[in-house]
Image (cartoon, rainbow, N blue to C red):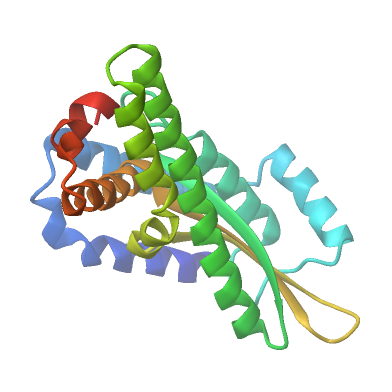
């Protein structure tokens, strides 16, 4: 299993090689450090907290699909990614989780992934709304202007969800229900900066279409 996972990791490195030249030296160094940490994680034992949480999941009937990381490893990776921060100390990833039930595993998984993306979009909405409210408190934006942006943010959840690119599957579990249906739980991750950038584009486009000039000052007002 470890050899298979390392092979996938090596393949991933070759797949991103063309992009490597576009990265700065600091970014290249950061990427190499992340790969090194991932390799160490594959060969190390899961943390005590991850093992404790895995025990609880197993007691509730959850299990992993063949060919995936062990439950303990998946939860350990999830915890590590939740604590991961960028060079400025801000969260590197935004995490989304959802469960769904279906007659088949694939149907339940597909629905759970969509719900998890909606969860991500909701978190982005909340964060942007807080930023807008902060600009009012700091008198950088009038209440009427803030209300206009907030209205656009509230109406953009589905568009934000659709704009989210390829997510990182972190946890994928399932359990069999008494009626023979499958219940699937997924936990996904997405780069925080990429998520906010996608949301910004959607909000700016909507404001432009409404003829609202606030789109010109979004970067300054929201600190992006």
Looking at the image, how many numbered discs can be counted on the residues?
0
Q: Position of residue 215 (x, y in %)?
A: 18, 39
Return the residue nearer the eye: 61 or 183: 183
What's the residue at 79%, 84% (across, down)? 181
Left or right? Give the position of 135 relative to 78.
left
Return the residue nearer the eye: 71 or 206: 206
What's the residue at 63%, 60% (across, down)? 98
Q: Is residue 218 above or below residue 12?
A: above
What's the residue at 49%, 51% (across, down)? 120
Image quarter of the C terminus: top left
Q: Position of residue 217 (x, y in %)?
A: 17, 30
Image quarter of the N terminus: bottom right
Q: Quadrant of residue 11?
A: bottom left
Left or right? Give the position of 112 relative to 87.
right
What's the residue at 80%, 57% (across, down)? 57
Return the residue nearer the eye: 158 or 169: 158
Q: Is residue 118 above or below residue 109?
A: above
Q: Position of residue 19 (x, y in %)?
A: 14, 56
């Amino acid at each position: 299993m470890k050899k298979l996972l390392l092979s996938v990791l090596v393949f991933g490195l070759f797949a991103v090689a063309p992009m490597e030249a576009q990265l700065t030296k600091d970014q290249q160094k950061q990427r190499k450090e992340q790969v090194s940490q991932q390799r160490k994680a594959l060969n190390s034992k899961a943390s005590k907290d991850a093992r404790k949480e895995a025990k609880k999941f197993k007691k509730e009937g959850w299990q992993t699909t063949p060919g995936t990381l062990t439950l303990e490893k998946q939860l350990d990776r999830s915890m590590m990614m939740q604590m991961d921060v960028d060079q400025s100390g801000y969260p590197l990833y935004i995490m989304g989780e959802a469960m769904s039930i279906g007659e088949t595993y694939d149907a339940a998984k597909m629905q759970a992934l969509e719900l998890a993306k909606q969860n991500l979009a909701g978190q982005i909405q909340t964060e942007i709304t807080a930023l807008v409210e902060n600009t009012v408190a700091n008198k950088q934006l009038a209440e009427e202007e803030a209300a206009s942006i907030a209205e656009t943010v509230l109406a953009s959840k589905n568009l934000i969800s659709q704009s989210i690119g390829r997510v990182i599957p972190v946890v994928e579990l399932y359990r069999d229900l008494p009626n023979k249906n499958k219940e699937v739980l997924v936990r996904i991750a997405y780069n925080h900066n990429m998520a906010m950038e996608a949301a910004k584009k959607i909000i700016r486009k909507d404001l432009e279409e409404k003829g609202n000039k606030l789109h010109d000052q979004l970067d300054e007002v929201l600190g992006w």
